[in-house]
Amino acid sequence: MNQLSKTKRQIWISMNFLSLVAIIVFYYASKYFAEPLVFLVGGAISAIVLIISFIKVYAQTGLWKMVHSGKHNLDERQMEVVMNALRYSYVIFAISVLILIYGFTLFVKGPIHVLVAGGFLYFAHILPAAIIGFRENEI
């Protein structure tokens, strides 16, 4: 496992979240300006950053495995850290989804695009690991 300092983990996690948001922003910008090249280029670059940052911060550090493994693979401290992260991520995710749904209802007046829904699915899976990566000094 490759360990990163807390500050470097925070930077990579931030890059991961920002690249996810950028993919969606480039999609809607390409629709607004009727210019598919905006999404193709911007979305591709953002997707590459998303993949690299995912590998760097979640796969190589073991955060993904820690959050997605069963409790029999974790010691007591790790189980407590994961449970707290899951609790916080549930609250953050529930509020985020409600804001998204009401935002689309009030401002967009249309359905939520599959890209946004997929982004939220990814967000739900990485959020507990991101919380641990941001808060814990050692993993």
Image: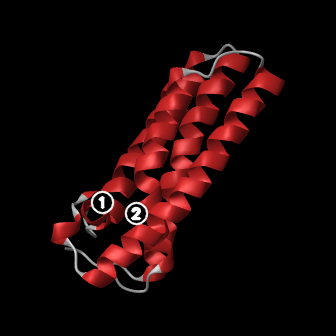
Residue occupying the point 66% across, 48% down? 95
Residue occupying the point 77% across, 17% down? 109
Residue 125, relative to residue 31: is it above or below?
below
- Residue 100 located left or right of residue 57: right
Residue 118, relative to residue 9: is it above or below?
above
Q: Nearer the viewer, residue 51 or 109?
A: 109
Across and down, in percent, residue 81 comes to 40, 76
Q: How is the image coloured?
A: secondary structure
For disc 2, the marked residue is 129
Across and down, in percent, residue 43 comes to 50, 33
Q: Nearer the viewer, residue 129 or 1?
A: 129
Q: Nearer the viewer, residue 83 or 55?
A: 83
Residue occupying the point 57% across, 21% down? 113
Q: CA distance from mark 2 to mark 1?
A: 6 Å
10 Å crowding of disc 2: few (<14), some (14-19), many (20+): many
- Residue 135 located left or right of residue 61: right
Mark 2 or mark 1: name the one nearer the start of the chain: 1
- Which amino acid, mark 2? Ala
Quadrant position of the N terminus in the picture: bottom left
Q: Which mark is residue 111?
A: none
For disc 1, the marked residue is 64
Residue occupying the point 28% across, 70% down? 61
| Helix, strand or loop status at disc 1 | helix
Asked whether the beta carbons under mark 2 and mark 1 sit within 8 Å of each other, the answer is yes
Q: Nearer the viewer, residue 38 or 104?
A: 104
Across and down, in percent, residue 7 comes to 49, 80
- Which amino acid, mark 1? Trp
